[in-house]
Amino acid sequence: MLHIANSTTTSKTITGKVVAYITQGDKLLVFSHPAFPEAGIQVPAGTIKEGEAPEEAVLREAREETGLDELEIRSFLGVQDYDLAAYGRAEIHRRYFFHLEFCGEAPATWRHYENDPSDGSPAPIEFEFFWVRLPDEVPELSGGQGALLSEVGFDDDRQRLVESALSGITLPTDVAIRAWTDADFPSIQRLSSTEGWPTPENRPDDALAAWRQSWPALVATDGETVIGFLRALTDGAVTTYIAELLVEPRWRGKGIGRALVETCHNLCPSTRLDLLTTGSGDRFYEAAGFRHFGGYRKSYR
């Protein structure tokens, strides 16, 4: 557990602060002040209370400012001092930066009110939240809040794992396998609809949430075109369940489906692979080393 105590040096007060980079997939949550546009674009942040650990403070501040509850700390990114001398204040903000992940469902934009501003401003303060894609769509964050944003690297971390898992796996020329991103979802909808799988088209919000909360989650591509995908869930120790595996018909028989399965298993090497399949998939899975077991499914209501 990290610890911070607010203190006073001989000339400047040091105040503990937290900064939250909240992501969902490849997007970062930011906000503006409708009543104070000059404040610029920011991310959730606030003051560490007396006796409060930074990791406790960042979750409290993030929830209070955004109204979101389903937040998890992914990593502590580091600490930096931010001198307020340029603002005419003899104060240093000792900022503890965290990467948080939002695991629920949220609209593209919404407004929320801060009812207990840490700077003493009159409450409530209205914030307008929206998502921007990492890294290219992120605007300059005011007050130096973007100092450690480059350390987030969520999708980069997963892609490095996938690249390692692909070692020794042969793919057709120009075909690649990578970690999925939100930008792939329209292609997943298209392929699923063509196959007669209705959920991504009929329940897009639920299907997108399912992909965001799944791992391993992979796509196979020919250049920039998604030609196959695999979505799985794992406990990381005993079982990995393959929820969806699909390859575009004209690309079948080229080893892409098998490569997706092998990559998935290499990402969770200590687990067994379980799945449900229709009779038409029996030959593929038996050739890939799977044994046949009976199974049941109860559909959603």
Image (spheres, rainbow, N blue to C red):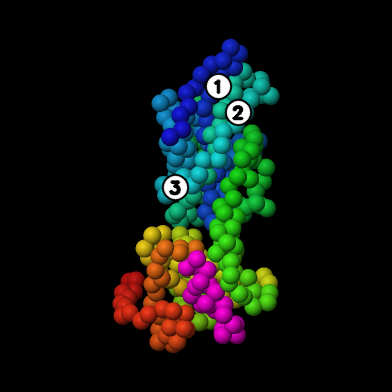
Mark 2 or mark 3, whichever is nearer to me: 2
Look at the numbered discs 2 and 1 and tell me whether their residues touch, using CB distance below 8 Å.
yes
Please identify the quarter of the rendering in which residue 278 is found: bottom left
Report the magenta stretch's main SS.
helix
Tell me if residue 80 comes above or below residue 184 in the rendering: above
Examine the structure image and report whether residue 227 is included in the region drawn in magenta. no
Question: Label 2 amino acid?
Answer: Asp
Element carrying mark 1: strand
Question: What x and y, as percent, mark residue 166?
Answer: 57, 67
Question: What x and y, as percent, mark residue 102?
Answer: 47, 51
Please identify the quarter of the rendering in which residue 276 is found: bottom left
Q: Is residue 235 left or right of residue 211?
A: left
Look at the numbered discs 2 and 3 and tell me whether their residues touch, using CB distance below 8 Å.
no
Please identify the quarter of the rendering in which residue 53 is found: top left
Element carrying mark 2: strand
| Residue position marked by numbered label 1 in the rendering | 14
Question: What x and y, as percent, mark residue 19?
Answer: 54, 37
Gap in Å between the C-alphas at discs 2 and 1? 9 Å
Q: In the picture, which quadrant includes the N terminus?
A: top left
Residue at (45, 67) in percent of width and height: 232
Tell me if residue 19 comes above or below residue 191 in the rendering: above
Gap in Å between the C-alphas at discs 1 and 3? 28 Å
Question: Which residues are the magenta region?
Answer: 245-266
First in sequence: mark 1 vs mark 3: 1
Is residue 187 at all visible to an observer of this figure?
no
Question: Label 3 amino acid?
Answer: Leu
| Residue position marked by numbered label 2 in the rendering | 81
Element carrying mark 3: strand
